[in-house]
Amino acid sequence: MSLNNYLKIAFLFITQLVLAQEQTTITGVITDGTTPVPFANIIVEGSTNGVAADENGSFEITLSLEEATLVFKAVGFKTQRKAIQPENFRNKPLAIELQEDLLGLEEVVVSATRNRISKKEAPVIVKVLSPKLFKATQSISLADGLNYQPGVRVETNCQNCGFTQVRLNGLEGQYTQILVNSRPVFSALNGVYGLEQIPVSIIDRVEVVRSGGSALFGSNAIAGTVNVITKEPVNNSWEVNSNLGLIDGKTADRTLNMNTSIVSEDLSTGVTLYGMYRDRDAFDANGDGFSEITKLTNHSFGSKAFYRPNDNSRIGLDFTAIKEYRRGGDRIELAPQFTDITEELDHNTIFTGADYELYNDERTNNLSVYASLQHTDRKSYYGGLGGGRTAADSIAANNAFGNTKDLGLVSGAKFSHTFKNKDVLTSGVEYQLNDTEDAILGYNRVVDQQVNSFGLYSQYEWKPLKDFTTLLGARLDHISVDGYYTIQNIERTSEVSETVLSPRITLLYDITHELQFRGGYARGFRAPQAFNEDLHISSVGGEQRFAILSDDLESEFSNAYTASLNLTKNFNKTQTSLLVEGFYTTLQNPFTLVSTGASLPNGAILEESRNGSGAYVAGTNVELTVSPSQDLYFQAGITYQKSIYKEDQVLFESDGTVPGENNVVISEFTRAPNLYGFFNVNWVISEAFKMDLAASYTGSMIAPHVVSDSGFIALEETPQFIDVTPKVTYHFDLKDTFHIELSTGIQNVFNSYQDDFDRGPLRDSDYIYGPNRPRTFFFGIRFGDF
Amino acid sequence: MKQLIFFLFLSCGSLIAQKSDQQINWLSWEELEEALTENPKKTLVFFHADWCAYCKKIDRVVFTKPEVIAKVNRDFYAVRMNAETTDTITFDGKVFTNPLAKTQRNAVHQLAALLGSREDQDFSLPVTLIFDKQFKVKRRIFEYYTSKELLKYLNQ
């Protein structure tokens, strides 16, 4: 039996000739510039006519005499289209040169339209953060890895409790919606510390959508969304991972992570179990006995299970429990009431969720139904003696214990239908409940808030032309807020019942196959309520600083516009991608914290959340990716932006009693640098060795700094920072089912860190900016069957 | 002591024997060609790649089942090939290489592309082929299967 005979049989399988009147047969050859590309598929666009090239890249196709567009597809190459007049190629072969696809442009993403879609076809720009990047930066939690995207910056806001938030395009954390598997499971309270509570080991990828255009995910997603997608296992696997970091060479940060997956042979059932333990000592940068980085002990474990009754349906169940303890201030070994300043938080959180997905046989209809529940029980201590030693100080310190209960519920259903012409209609409903009760009796502080929101959304993905896609959608939200807030002698309420329509439109136009234009408009709004930052208490002048909603707070509206050009081009074997994006977001009645100084009866500072003057953020994100070879990958991004109040905004309101202290007004956002960016290189030296270099740049910004007992603030201009992390990884296999990976490196190798922290018990604990850790040496070991 | 060493030898020996029993007897393409000329049999060909999670699952779960091993070793010649290998393979007087590997990631070897390509879809893994005694394709499978499903295909 000869193989050559067999080859013919194989080709009968994979070629199909279509007969029509007035035909001509043309021949051609497909190469990558130098060598032939075998077995590419050649299809006549808009028809079922197609053939496959042979192993030498040669093909023969029969066409009718009209002009035809041929589509060339081969694994690992970019799809190429070429319009030809068949008669021109009667006597000469058609030469086709395909370009490799090294940049992963064909990756699949979820965030853009809530359906799986190739990244290149998504009308909204979706940036994907892969586990590779988290590894390159030795990230332990989500908070550490997010800096390496244009327009994204993670900052620490408190020396006492380590409250972190992610800023997209310069807007504060509350303008960003954090999703887990496309669902908004984070409540206002979780948003305070939640970014540090998601272990990296369970993350498959993180999808970041900047600016508007993603309003389908919620009316509060004004700056954008951060969508954490967890892993979906196929194989049985296990992994143990441990890391030791030495902050400034002395303060230990120890982590142990493990996860394992079991999936049945028929893939119909499976479970992933994961756990993390982290113990970080408090770090004191300036030797004053007060922490700059909080002590943190975190135990998390959880499971995700799935069951597929048949090929077209899937039931998922997940549970996660997080117990997290954090404490900052001084004399961490003592009970909090015997210290000058302590912020101590003991979180017990449980997340649970269930989801069901159903498809029809043709996969044109998809229904998904989901519900998730989150409950947090938090014990807090925000207080201390504040530098005094009187009986009154002691009584106050003993009364600073608090309790918080937080309940979050999300449930919804989504249906999508793909029409014969590939248009897609997606509609859904979503209900969210968030009930927060936070009480510190010693300060007569209460936050008792219930937010109910009911949303209806619909979106049509319309492809009227081959090169043009547009998403037309809208979201109708009904929000009711029932809030009661007190602090000492001040009492506020929020009663809102409001229905708002948020339209959305985005479009994608392929100018050429290398150059794409995207544009979008989205409207968003937020109803008056206490957000994460309003639940956070910090200290200054030995007293606490509280935030409360002002009377008659009105809803905040925003309009976000984006436009971008994306150029992907090859220079010989070097592949490049350049993205230039402009964004412009206007805010109407933005919720702004205004300090009223030490206006509370006990001398504590009160900040009020008020409707600020109108504002806008406008700027440009530029991102360049270059891959000169398979082993080298280079990425850099920079953001230049302005964040401007249309009228000067009061940040500190003076009561006029202290001479020389007047209102402090500002024309631009605080804590929002005009220039920031990142850079990273991954280099695979050999199969065993890998090197990574990651850097982030934070430009100068304005940071408010409380400089007097009255709460008066100075506006300080911060220096710029470059945080560089080199890392080497060595990989070897003991067996094909047992891998070991050793890694070491230095985070913030140039020790680019804030050097003007306040000192002692009277310090302003919010006066912290720049990179979130000084030079840190780290050593990691990872082993398992992964 | 001597007894212990003797016992160890014995158990090592039996382990090795056991191991060869518990594995599919994979042939190279060259060995397959020789075997086919000497004693024609049905053939099973399996293409995989390092990154392919479903291939790994088949390798670890399906190809390790005693009933699959017994069936394949009794009635089939079996070839398991990394679709992205850069080896030069000679089969039936023809030389197959992986010229694309010089210039791209995850380049598919000529032989794998020849047998595993489909008309209107991109090359995807895993790919499994079942040939009859005349080395004619009886079935091409482009997805994951359980041991039960594989046995069904093999018995057809």
Image (spheres, helix red, strand yellow):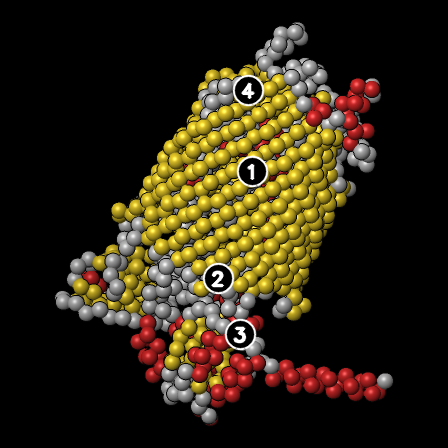
Identify the element where label 2 is drawn: strand
Q: Position of residue A665 (x, y in %)?
A: 55, 16
Q: Hey, what amino acid is under mark 4? A: Ser
Alpha carbon of mark 2 to alpha carbon of mark 1: how far? 30 Å
Task: Identify the mark at residue A308; answer none if there is no mark.
Answer: 2
Q: Hey, what amino acid is under mark 1? A: Ser
Q: Residues within 10 Å of mark 3 (few under 14, many from 20)?
A: many
Query: In which quadrant is the N terminus of chain A drawn?
Result: bottom left
Alpha carbon of mark 2 to alpha carbon of mark 3: how far? 19 Å
Identify the element where label 3 is drawn: helix
Residue topped by disc 1: A187
Q: Residues within 10 Å of mark 2 (few under 14, many from 20)?
A: some
Q: Position of residue A590 (x, y in %)?
A: 49, 24
Identify the element where label 4 is drawn: loop
Mark whose residue sits in front, 3 or 1: 1
Alpha carbon of mark 3 to alpha carbon of mark 1: how far? 44 Å
The answer as to whether the residues below labels 4 and 3 share one chain is no
Residue at image location 64% in from the left, 59% down from the top: A239
N-terminal of the two: label 4 or label 2? Answer: 2
Identify the element where label 1 is drawn: loop
| Relative height, residue A669 to residue B119 (above, below) | above
Q: Position of residue B22 (x, y in %)?
A: 60, 81
Q: Hey, what amino acid is under mark 2? A: Arg
Alpha carbon of mark 4 to alpha carbon of mark 2: how far? 51 Å
**Marks 3 and 1 close (CB-CB < 8 Å):** no
Mark whose residue sits in front, 4 or 3: 4
Residue topped by disc 3: B62
Residue at image location 57% in from the left, 25% down from the top: A484
N-terminal of the two: label 2 or label 1? Answer: 1
Task: Identify the mark at residue A550; answer none if there is no mark.
Answer: 4
In the image, taking residue A433 as reference, residue A572 lies left or right, namely left
Q: Residue furthest left?
A: A22
